[in-house]
Amino acid sequence: MLMRSTTAEAAAPVVPGRFPLLGHLPQLAVRRVDFLQSVRARGEIVRIFLGNRPVFVLNSPAAVHDVLVTQSRKFGKGLLFDVARPFIGNGIITSEREVHRRQRRALQPAFHRDGIAACVGTMTGIAEEQVAAWRPGEVIAMDLVMRRMMTGMLVATLFSTERPDGAVGVAELGERVAEHLTTVMRGVFVGTVLPAPIASSPVLGHRTYLSAAAALRELADTSVRQARQDPADRGDLLSVMFAGTPGNPRGMTDTEARDELLSLLMAGAETTSTTLSWALHELGRRPEITERIRAECAALPAGALPSAATLPYTDRFLREVLRLHQPNWLLMRRASEPVRVRGVELPRGAELIYSAVTMHRDPAYFPDPLRFDPDRWLRRTEKDLPPGAYVPFALGNRKCIGDHFAMTEMLVVLRSIVSRWRPRPVAGRRIRPVVQALIRPNALPMRVSPWPAR
C-alpha cells in the first residue's frame, strides 16, 4: 500500500540502492516497471538518480493530478521530450506553453466528434481489406499486423494526398513509416535514460535511429509539399493545419505542418497498435469475451458509429486493456519554477517521472489489480476514481488530443476482426512483455479460425 504524505513540508526521500556515479540507472535499466512499482511504497514523491541527475517520481493520484492539472502551468515537458525534439520537431507532443496552446487550438477541429465520424469509413475500409485477406487456420503475427494497420490508418488520414498506386501504395507507405517509428521511439528511450556519450554509441543503434528519423522527416516534408500544391480542402488533417485560425490567420507553415504530422504519427500509431496487440492477446486467452464482443458488434445497427454508447462492453474491454496493459510506462515533466507538490518543495528545473502502469495497478483503486475484468468499470466508473488514478491518455492541457480518435480506431479494428474470426494463441508460444519505449509483446502469433455457421 502506498505510504501517504503526513507532513506539511518535507524533502522527497531518496530510494535506497543508489550506486556511485550510476545512481539508480542499473535498477531502471534492468527492472524498469518493476523498479518503479517497488518505489511506490516509499512515499507520494520520491527521488531516484539517473547517474548524478536527481529525478522525482510521482506515486499518488493526487501528486499526478497536481502536476498535470492543478499546477500544470508551472511544468514543462521534460527530458524525454528534449531528446525527441531534434528528431520529430516542435509539434504538439514536444512544444511548450503558448506555442503548444496555439497548435492545440489549430488542430482541435480535426478531433471533434464530427471530424472523427468522417474518418470511420476510411478506418473501416483499411481494417476490412486487411482482415478479409486472412485465411482459415492461418497464423498471423498480430503485433506486426496491428502496427501496419494502425500506421496505415493514420497515413490515410494524415497523408491523404491522392496516390497513383492507391491502397497498395498507402499500405506500403504505412509499413515503411511503422518501421521507422519503432526505431525512433527506441532511440528516444535510450537517449532519455542513458548519458549522451553512451546513448550515441553505434553499438546501441544510434546511426539507425538518426537514419530512421531523417526518413520520417522526408516523408512528412514530401506530404506537406504535395498537399500545399493542391489548396483544396480535402477534409484531412493537413487541410486543417493549412486553414487559418483567429490566433494564426495564415495557418501553419510547412515546417510547422511537418512537425505536427510527425507528432501525430509518434503519438497515434505505436501506442494504439500496441494496445490492440494486448487486446488481441486477452481475446485469445478469453474466448467468452470474444463471443460477447462479437454479439455486441453484430447487434450494432447499420450506419451506427462505433462508440462507448453503441458498443459499451467493447469499450469497457478496451479501457481494461489500457489499465492492465498501458503501453506508456514512463512519462516526464520538468518544473519551470520552484513549486510545492504534496508538501514537497521542487526546485526550478526538477525532472519528474510518473508511470501510468504503476498507477493503474494500485489495489487501493483497482481491487485485485492484476486480474483482467472489463466489468470492474461497471462497479466503479472512471468518474468515481480519484483524479489521477486512471490516466491512459494523460490529463489536463497536455491530455492526448486524439484520445477519442484512438478509441474509435480500436473499436473499428476489433469489430472487423471478431466479426469474421476467432483469434487463438499458438500452442507453446509464451507471450511476455518487453519494456522499451513502450511495453509491447515480445511477439504475438495467433491462429485465426472462422466462426461456425449458425
Image: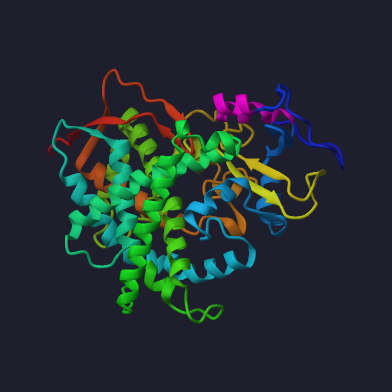
Name the magenta segment's main secondary structure. helix
Residue 29, position in %: x, y? Answer: 56, 28
As drawn, 257 above or below 197: below
As drawn, 454 above or below 15: below
* Near-viewer residue (281 or 418): 281
Asked whether the viewer can see residue 231, the reply is yes
Q: At 37% from the left edge and 38% from the top edge, which residue is drawn?
A: 279
**For this view, does 190 lie left or right of residue 271?**
right
Residue 193, position in %: x, y? Answer: 59, 36
Spot the residue most to the right: 8
Query: Is residue 29 one of those drawn in magenta?
Result: yes
Task: Give the residues drawn in magenta, as a range.
Answer: 25-42
Please identify the quadrant where the N terminus is shown.
Answer: top right
**For this view, does 362 lie left or right of residue 106?**
right
* Near-viewer residue (47 or 256): 256
Residue 349, position in %: x, y? Answer: 73, 49
Query: Is residue 85 one of those drawn in magenta?
Result: no
